[in-house]
Structure formats: C-alpha cells, structure tokens
Amino acid sequence: MYERILVATDGSTLSKKAVTSAIQLAATCGAELVAVKIVPRYPQAYFEGSIPLSAEEISRVEKQWTESAQSNLDGVQKLAKTKGVSVKTVTVKSDVVSDAIIATAKKHKADLIVMASHGRKGIKRLLLGSETQQVLTHSHIPVLVLR
C-alpha cells in the first residue's frame, strides 16, 4: 500500500501520537519511515521579531534547537526500531514549516505524509497559523491528519 511514509514531529504530545500511528502504519504496510523535524532559523532583524543578539549567541541558540530536534528524532528512531520499522531521520532548517514538510516528502519520495493537527480555531489559528492546513492545501502527496 505505502512504501515510504513521512511523519512530521514537533515533539508535542499530539505529534507523538501521530508518530506512534505512523510507526504502526509503516509496520503494517512494511513501509520505510522518514521522520522530519523542522527547525526554525533565528530571526536576524528587529522587524522579524528578534532581539539583537551577537552572531555567537545566535549560533548557540540555533545549535541548541538543532540538538533538541535530533534528540526528538532519536526517540522516534528508537521507537520505530522496537517495532521493526526502518526509519530515516531528517532535520530541516526552514522558516516555513509547511513548505519544508512538503519539500522533504518530495525529496524522499514519500507516498504519504502523517502529521498532527492541534485543532486551533478563531484568533489562536489566526495568530499561530495552521501548518497542517497549509500542507493539506498545497501537497500533492496524500496527507493523514491525526488529532
């Protein structure tokens, strides 16, 4: 049915449920799993919402975010291996999460994207956005959304 499933994770409780479901689906289908964590770039300008920091401090913050992402992905890898699922982990630096997820799915030839939706509505959705909605809207690859 599926040969390669991409699962997007942000480390939240809800995305951990999506990871668990993606692993179960991959095990059932005999599919390979690609786990991706998108890491933002630190805003460089005041107008992007940053406070002025030195280049060294920005580098330290980005390194910390990348290490945290890798730790998250290591957990996914460990869980997948216990279920006998082959997994590749990918960390991507991008400011536009939805585009990065779609691009990663294309790059790794995924035939399904699995991700969680926080189900935000109203002003929270307006302020925080919906990456899941953007992936659903712009992806030509099927998307399985879990809540």
Image: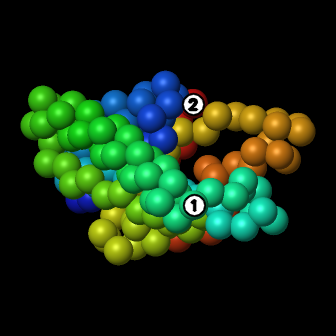
Q: Quadrant of the N terminus?
A: bottom left
Estimate the x, y position of residue 135 in percent, counting from the top left.
59, 59
Q: Position of residue 25 (x, y in %)?
A: 30, 39
Q: Amino acid at mark 1?
A: Ser
Circle nearer the viewer, 2 or 1: 1
The residue under label 1 is 54
Find residue 75 and report its image quarter.
top left
Helix, strand or loop status at disc 2 = loop
The residue where tag 2 is placed is 147
Q: Residue 36: tell me if it is visible.
A: yes
Q: Residue at coordinates 39% horizontally, 53% vertically from top-left?
A: 63
Q: Helix, strand, or loop for circle 1?
A: loop
Distance CA(mark 2)–CA(mark 1): 40 Å
- Residue closer to the observer: 95 or 26: 95
Q: Is residue 5 left or right of residue 44?
A: left
Q: Residue at x 31, y 70 (%)?
A: 109
Give amino acid for label 2.
Answer: Arg
